[in-house]
Image: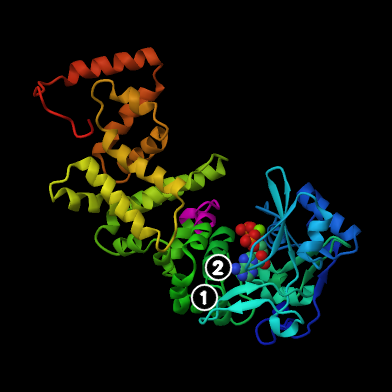
Amino acid sequence: MVFSQDYALLENVGQPVSPRIIPRAEHHISRSQISPNALKVLYRLHENGYDAYLVGGGVRDLMLGREPKDFDIATNATPEEVRGLFKNCRLIGRRFRLAHIRYGREIIEVATFRAPHDEAEHVDQAHSEDGRILRDNVYGTLEQDVWRRDFTINALYYNIADFSVVDYTGGVEDLNQGMLHLIGDPIERYKEDPVRMLRAVRFAAKLGFNIDKDSENAIHDLGGLLKNVSPARVFDEMLKLFHGGCAAQTFELLRHYDLFQYLFPETDAHLDSELGEIMLPLISRALNNTDQRIQDGKPVNPAFLIAILLWHLVVEKQEAIMSNGVPPFPAMQQAGQQVMSAQIRSLSIPKRFSLVAKEIWIMQLRLPNRRGKRPLVLLAQQRFRAAYDFLCLRGQSGEDELQEVCEWWTRFQEQNPEDRNSMLRSDKRRKRRPRKRKSRSPDA
Ligand code: ATP
Ligand code: MG
């Protein structure tokens, strides 16, 4: 059955249409799969006479038999009314006013149904000249809320009143078909919010879905609008793109749709040059490693991937600075600073991450030098582990001479402290060579 024809999906957005209601017996979402805190919020809203639905990725992922990342709730209660029901509630956001209900580390996000501004009595909406939505706090009904969501598969509502799923846009059919379908006119919807292009890629990679032709073609034409999005929001989106467990596939798709240039413009330009052949193996190894770590439940620091993605630019710049007679260490510091300053114009990188990335870069100069007691000092440094992983990845990705260094550090870490000292002593005997009396090492 082709449901999309029953729905006013593309032509009649916002017109009255009847939803398809999938009763409890005909879908696989069970309350045992929903976070107890999200259920608590749903029930409390319902008991107080409000409509309450689980919506977005939570419903989508449960329908697909996947574990949701988070649980979002939609309701007809206003943010203030939600706050009145939960003492652990905070209202956030200017562009979209939302209620955050906190239970320990888990935050349940509750959004009030929104209406398009021409159908609402009270309008608090603003657009930029290029059609971007700057503020959108116009409250409405579920029927209206559906049309402002991005993809049909993200516009399914699980009703806590009777455990049915409400589908206005053909989302269930698209889930079955593995299709990403932007709701409404793709050009208009990307203009309203260019980040939807990045979301299309993210969901396509994560779910292994295809992007429908119209939604896909518009990406090629409108990618440039991402330049108008605030660098802080692009950073948030980058984290979701690369820390969602399928970074390698996401990177492929970002490159395929020419969108990577809006995240890391200089890196992207270099990837298309001769340097690309050297850069790609390192990037691709790092992305696969990140995916593996996430699969294994290990922590990932965004600084590591950022350091990888910018590494060859830093090396190139360092070499240019050194050619003016600047020694390697200050040259690396200057290069790191310059590359970061250029980068944050597109995608802002909070200081806590950019500092770590710069430390990882500097450590790349220090790790090969294992003279004297230096290794003990380096090993004790906070960034040692990240810098060592980074160096080993470089060794595996074409810089063969680093493999020996990586292996040495691997052995050194495996030793107990006493044996580490003897490893240093034996290395000293082997490597001893005459030193000029007053010479200074570059990192002294
Ligand atoms: P996940 O949480 O797994 O990354 P998600 O679809 O839940 O995916 P969220 O960012 O949590 O994504 O957003 C929740 C829901 O809000 C989405 O499913 C979608 O319905 C709506 N939404 C989020 N961002 C946008 C956007 N930029 N434009 C339109 N609707 C959006
Ligand atoms: Mg979500």
Give the residue pinned by disc 1: 216
Quarter assignment of residue 425: top left
Question: Could you tell me residue 247's position as x and y percent?
Answer: 49, 54
Numbered disc 1: secondary structure: helix
Question: Could you tell me residue 306's position as x and y percent?
Answer: 41, 51
In the rendered structure, find residue 405 and report the number of the disc placed on it: none
Give the amino acid at mark 2. Answer: Ala
Give the amino acid at mark 1. Answer: Glu
Q: Earlier in the sequence, mark 2 or mark 1?
A: 2
Give the residue pinned by disc 2: 200
Question: Could you tell me residue 432's position as x and y percent?
Answer: 15, 19
Residue 297, can we see it?
yes
Residue 26 to residue 116: above or below: above
- Label 2: few (<14), some (14–19) or many (≥20) C-alpha neighbours in 10 Å: many
Q: Is residue 164 left or right of residue 333?
A: right
| Residue nearer the viewer, 78 or 403 | 78
